[in-house]
Structures are given as structure tokens and as C-alpha cells.
Image (cartoon, rainbow, N blue to C red):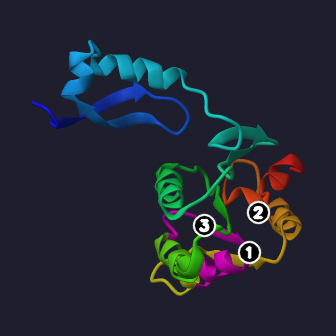
Amino acid sequence: RAGEREDVLVEGEDLGPGRRGRGVFCGWDVHHERAGFKPGDFIDAFRTVSMPGMRMERKEIRGVVWYNDAYNANPQSVRAGIVFLKGLNTENGSKKIFVFGDMRDLGETSDDLHEEIGALITREVADVLITVGDHAEQAGKRAAAGEDPPEQVVHCGTVSDAGKKVSDTAQQGDIVYMKASRGVALEAIVEKA
């Protein structure tokens, strides 16, 4: 039936970086079936997808796992990043560090949207939140004022300062996730790590 849609749930599959164990492929509909595709076709394709640079780009440097997702940022992509980071597990006291820079080009609603993002950043998401930029600072203030804030919330005036803070904070076994609009240039942090 046209317009009918089904989500395909996959249990116990290795779906790639950050996607192990359980995944949902949304939007499977009768149009795919009519075209001769089966849900397994998409799962196989998903395993082989490689993301362009700075889009969930994973690196391990001196025992620290870095996710550079700083190609672009808008409220929806940052929410997805928060869900991703929340789902990552650390072991033996390791930390999750979220480096969040401004989401640019949001117009008059920018402060409100950054504050909404800040409300989502709890201790369950990140142990340490480092913000860069005037708008991201609002997110940090909102996160710090929340019911279950990250253990540490720090605002840095520049990307260089944020890089120094990450360097001073990150230890072997930690995870660093970076998200910002492209113009913030957060990639400089991982390039100097």
C-alpha cells in the first residue's frame, strides 16, 4: 500500500562504528520492496558506508577515542550526536568529553536553540562539557543548571583554548566527541592531539 512504512529492527548485528548491537533502519516502505530490495540489502550497504571527513570521523590517538563530527551542526544533528554519545560506554572510570561549538546561521532563535541543546546534555551524556563560542556558552550554562549536569562544564573563548582543555583533561580510555558548525573549525583540536 502506498505510503505504508515499516521500521526494520536489527538485533545483534555489527553495524559499524558506534552502531553495534541494535539498530533501527527507518523508512522501509513498499516502494523499496517493489523495486526489488529486501531489508538485508540496506543492512549490508550500511556496513560498507564510509562517511566523508569530519562526519563521525573516528580516530584513536594515544588511547583516546576521538569522534570528529564537526563538519556542520544544526539542532537536529546535535540532538543525534547527543544520542550517539549517550549510547557509548566507557570503562574503568574513563570519561566522555563533549566539545560543543556554536551552531551558526540560526538567526534570532539561536540563543533559545542553544539553550534547548544544553538542557539535553546531562551527566549520562557526558562527564565533561567544553563549549566554544558565545552561543555554545549558553548551552553550557543551561547544562550546568540542569538536574543532572556533567561533572565539569567549561567555556573556552577559542578553539585553541578548548584544545588545551581537552589535552589537560583527556586520558587513555576516554572518548572525545566534537560537534559544531564548520566555521568554528573544531578539527584543529584533534589535528594537534
Residue under numbered circle 1 = 133
Identity of the residue drawn at 52% across and 39% down: 18
Q: Quadrant of residue 36?
A: top left
Secondary structure beneath dot 3 equals loop
Q: Amino acid at mark 2?
A: Val
Q: Which stretch is magenta?
A: 121-141
Q: Amino acid at mark 3?
A: Asp
Can you give x and y, in whole percent of width and height, for residue 23 in the image? 36, 36
Please tell me how many numbered marks the rendered image carries.
3
- In this orientation, which residue lies closer to the viewer: 92 or 154? 154
- Badge 1 or badge 3: first in the primary sequence: 3
**How far apart in space, not on screen, are marks 2 and 1 (Cα)?**
8 Å
Can you give x and y, in whole percent of width and height, for residue 154 in the image? 72, 77
Secondary structure beneath dot 2 equals helix
Pick out the residue farthest to the top.
36
Q: Residues within 10 Å of mark 1 (few under 14, many from 20)?
A: some
Q: Eyeballing the image, is 53 above or below 38?
A: below
**How far apart in space, not on screen, are marks 3 and 2 (Cα)?**
22 Å
Is mark 2 in CB contact (under 8 Å) with mark 1? yes
Can you give x and y, in whole percent of width and height, for residue 162 in the image? 81, 67
Residue under numbered circle 3 = 127
Identity of the residue drawn at 40% across and 34% down: 21
Secondary structure beneath dot 1 equals loop
**How far apart in space, not on screen, are marks 1 and 3 (Cα)?**
20 Å
Q: Eyeballing the image, is 103 above or below 20?
A: below
